[in-house]
């Protein structure tokens, strides 16, 4: 086997590395959300690499961020399409902080979350960026 072939087999592609890092325990919540805003993993990887903030990442995918004080998850489930304007309800509960951080992906091209949720997922996004850059 040639040395070049051994080197290629031992390295991750950008997408493989992205998937491997995103699948780590602390980043799984972020993985669940970004998997709902786009199914195209190449596009997700490219947008993460190009964005400097979580909000910019969402914008690159064509979503506008909407902040609200409270998200009532049970009410949001009742407004899932076709009855309402919500494509996905992503309830997230962070055990260490004991915080409920739901996100709504809406039909109108917006993502709704609370300021606390934005802070939390921005921190995870920064960690993802840090690990991708390492």
Image (cartoon, helix red, strand yellow):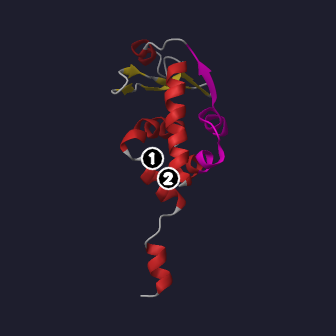
Residue 18 is labelled as 2
Q: What residue would you read off at disc 1? A: 22
Of the 4 image quadrants, the one containing the N terminus is: bottom left
| Secondary structure found at label 1 | helix
Q: Is residue 97 left or right of residue 63?
A: left
Badge 1 density bin: few <14, some 14–19, many ≥20, Cα 10 Å: many
2, 104: nearer the viewer: 2
Residue 100, x across and y down, in percent: 40, 20
Residue 85, x across and y down, in percent: 54, 20
Residue 121, x across and y down, in percent: 50, 31
Q: Where, by quadrant of the figure, is residue 66 drawn? A: top right
- Residue at image coords 50%, 82%: 4
| Secondary structure found at label 2 | helix
- Residue at image coords 52%, 34%: 123
Confirm whether residue 85 shows in the render: no
Residue 5, placed above or below residue 22: below
Confirm whether residue 42 shows in the render: yes
Q: CA distance from mark 1 to mark 2?
A: 6 Å
Asked if residue 110 is among those painted magenta in the image, a careful observer would answer: no
Q: Are marks 1 and 2 in contact (CB under 8 Å)?
A: yes
89, 21: nearer the viewer: 21
Badge 2 density bin: few <14, some 14–19, many ≥20, Cα 10 Å: many
Residue 12, placed above or below residue 62: below
Q: Tell me the magenta residue range.
A: 46-68
Residue 63, placed above or below residue 8: above
Asked if residue 56 is among those painted magenta in the image, a careful observer would answer: yes
């Amino acid at each position: 086997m040639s040395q070049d072939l051994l080197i290629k087999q031992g390295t991750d592609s950008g997408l493989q590395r992205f998937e491997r890092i995103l699948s780590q325990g602390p980043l799984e919540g972020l993985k669940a959300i970004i998997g709902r805003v786009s199914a195209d993993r190449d596009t997700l990887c490219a947008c993460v690499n190009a964005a400097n903030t979580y909000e910019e990442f969402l914008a690159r995918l064509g979503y506008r961020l909407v902040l609200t004080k409270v998200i009532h998850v049970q009410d949001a489930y009742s407004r899932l399409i076709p009855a309402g304007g919500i494509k996905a309800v992503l309830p997230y509960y962070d055990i260490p902080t004991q915080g409920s951080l739901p996100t709504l992906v809406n039909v109108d091209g917006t993502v709704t979350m609370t300021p606390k949720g934005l802070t939390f997922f921005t921190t995870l996004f920064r960690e993802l960026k840090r690990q991708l850059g390492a």
